Amino acid sequence: MKFNTKLLHSEVLESGEHGDILPPISQVTAFRYENMEELEKVFQHRRAGYAYSRIGNPTLTAFERRISDLEGGRGAVACSSGMAAITGALLAVCESGDEIVAASGLYGGTMDLLRDLEKLGIQTVFARRLDRPSLEKLITPRTRVIFGELISNPALDVMDIPEAAEAAHAAGVPLFVDSTTATPFLARPLSLGADVVIHSTSKYLNGGGNSIGGIIVDGQKFSWDFEKFGALTEFRKYGKMAFSVRLRTDIWENLGGCMAPVNAYLTHIGTDTLGLRMDRICENAARLAAALQELPGIQANHLSLPEHPCHEYVEKELGGYGGGILTFRAGSKERAFRIINGLRYAIIASNIGDLRTLVIHPASTLYINSSRQAREAAGVYEDTIRVSVGIEDADDLIEDFVRAVAKADGEPKENDIKE
Ligand SMILES: *Cc1c(COP(=O)(O)O)cnc(C)c1O
């Protein structure tokens, strides 16, 4: 089956006892049992069943099986947010005294989390790129995980997953990839060598901008050294499933970061159209980037542009797609604000992955608390505008941006595209 067929007809999408086409929303806290013996068996894991929605819920199970299947994984845990997913995944492999090696242009919330983890004795060291030389230099006997984003946002750096995985595995360390901006439509990191893939489902998987969520998918291929990974020692008997079991039965249950059943349902139906949306969004983004590049005093940044430093990965790793996020530099903060304020269709909002085109000035919002150095490592300058391209008609989007740029420069001419 190809991507869209699998999305709708995979065997993991079995219907329930009434033949429901979609998973019913079990928006409940607890599940009742006819007698105490049955509930006891559920607690002893001797009988399948649900007891309390923080530790398991059928609407979440349906969503977890679907995303795990799409990513080619062997187990998944649905979380209350992307941040809950990243927190849970890292805490399941790290304990005090351990180290993380991460890429430096990570999502702002993740950068803040890594600082929080320092206070718990988990240190992070950063590399600009997770390439072999950087990893060989930064991995120490205390390193427990390599963490990076497949396509960073808004820098738009692409991780070379096979290279990073090889260097990580040579040192006996797993590679965790945040693939939020790529989605399984562009790439499946587990098939490229990653061990665990994480998404903020709030973005493209949901697609409609209607619920916060996150998910962790485990490929269950990594061979854990239980002497080295103290966090997993107790789970030795589970072998390659140790991370999944520790994550679900310890960290996820006890942090209390479960996804809300109604959010799992909304994200499940959003996922139905992932292939169609991403195809359209990536095409729109490439067309808009090419049009912006032609405008006076605008410098566009999108993976589809041949001059982009990571352009080769579009074919090598991303199925020919450049993703739905583009940025452009407007020359000054004032001009950037004027352009943004002049847009008719693009909505000013702090999010990505919506059906609607969203636009923001990252330096004065998402990176307001970052140092200039950290901002610039993430590709954010005073004059940078980020666009999360939606599914509108590309011609309308291009016209909107061209008009807004002309208006910002005080020359509201209609046809402002240079030859
Ligand atoms: C949004 C985002 C997150 C955080 O997800 P939330 O659902 O907002 O908690 C993490 N990583 C990336 C790449 C993101 O875009």
Image: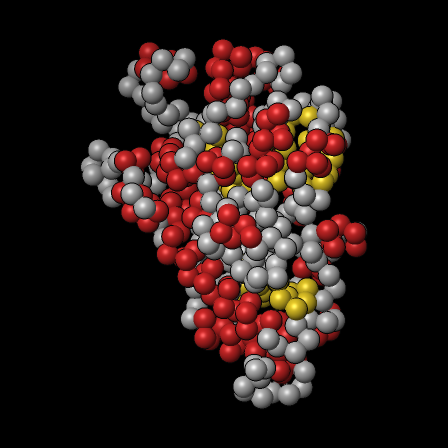
Q: Position of residue 155 (x, y in %)?
A: 65, 54
Rendered residue at 55%/52% (across/down): 312
Rendered residue at 37%/25% (across/down): 50
User: Can you say whether 372 is above or below 390 in the image?
Assistant: above
Q: Quadrant of the N terminus?
A: top left
Using residue 316 as the reference point, say whether residue 8 is left or right of it. left
* Residue 325 image-quadrant placement: bottom right
Q: Position of residue 222 (x, y in %)?
A: 52, 24
Q: Position of residue 106 (x, y in %)?
A: 65, 45
Q: Quadrant of the C terminus?
A: bottom right
Using residue 274 as the reference point, say whether residue 417 is left or right of it. right
User: Can you say whether 416 is above or below 93 in the image?
Assistant: below
Q: How is the image coloured?
A: secondary structure
Rendered residue at 69%/56% (across/down): 379
* Residue 37 image-quadrant placement: top left
Q: Position of residue 308 (x, y in %)?
A: 61, 59
Q: Which of the two residues, 35 or 89, is positioned nearer the viewer here?
A: 89
